[in-house]
Amino acid sequence: MEIIAWFIAALALAGLELAVGEFTLLMLGGGALAASGMAVLETPLWAQVLTFALVSLGLLFFIKPLLRRRMQVPLALDTSTGALVGHRAEVIEPVTEGGGQIKLDGTIWSAATVDPHAEYNAGEYVTVVRIDGPVAIVWKET
């Protein structure tokens, strides 16, 4: 009988989650499902309740944050030049402090180095540190 009670609780919590949508009731439903599994093994009621509590807390504190992060949608698509910061680019013409060219996100950009003594040759890959107008400021980690 305990098996059915835990299973119905799991289904009810999962069903209520559809109305709420914040994953809390779903995590509790997972705990109830684990307790139902313990009831199948004919463990005492205190072990089933303990299983429900531990699994629910584990799901709430470890899985729920991962799900929320995964389900969050960015507010807007960033199409500004700032979105290119951190991207890798291929050097087309040697890049120095004075200038050069890179292929960044499928387009050709003027580029300059962060380090005044650095020079990056054609074929090397660099990372965009910032965008100053039409010039990408790049850096290559050694």
Image (tube, rainbow, N blue to C red):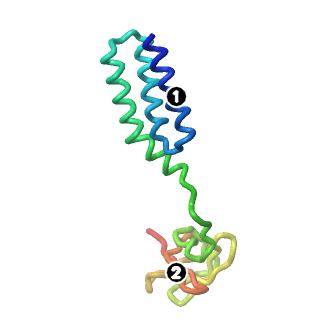
Nearer-N-terminus badge (2/1)? 1
Q: Residues within 10 Å of mark 2 (few under 14, many from 20)?
A: many
Nearer the viewer's eye, disc 2 or disc 1? Answer: 1
Residue at the spot of label 1: 12
Counting from the top left corner in percent of width and height, residue 100 is at 59, 84
Quadrant for the N terminus in the image: top left
Instruction: Kindly indicate whether the residue at mark 1 contacts the one at mark 2 (C-beta within 8 angstroms).
Output: no
- Relative to the observer, which residue lies in front, 92 or 130? 130
Residue at x-position 45% and y-position 20%: 6
Mark 2, secondary structure of its residue:
strand
Circle number at residue 137: 2
Circle number at residue 47: none
**95 horizontally vs 49: left or right:** right
- Relative to the observer, which residue lies in front, 29 or 129? 29
Above or below, 39 relative to 101:
above
Above or below, 90 relative to 136:
above
Counting from the top left corner in percent of width and height, residue 102 is at 62, 77
**107 horizontally vs 11: left or right:** right
Residue at x-position 41% and y-position 14%: 39
Q: Amino acid at mark 2?
A: Ile
Q: Residues within 10 Å of mark 1 (few under 14, many from 20)?
A: some
- Relative to the observer, which residue lies in front, 99 or 62? 62
Q: Amino acid at mark 1?
A: Ala
Above or below, 36 relative to 22:
above
Residue at x-position 58% and y-position 86%: 133
Residue at x-position 48% and y-position 72%: 140
Counting from the top left corner in percent of width and height, residue 117 is at 44, 84
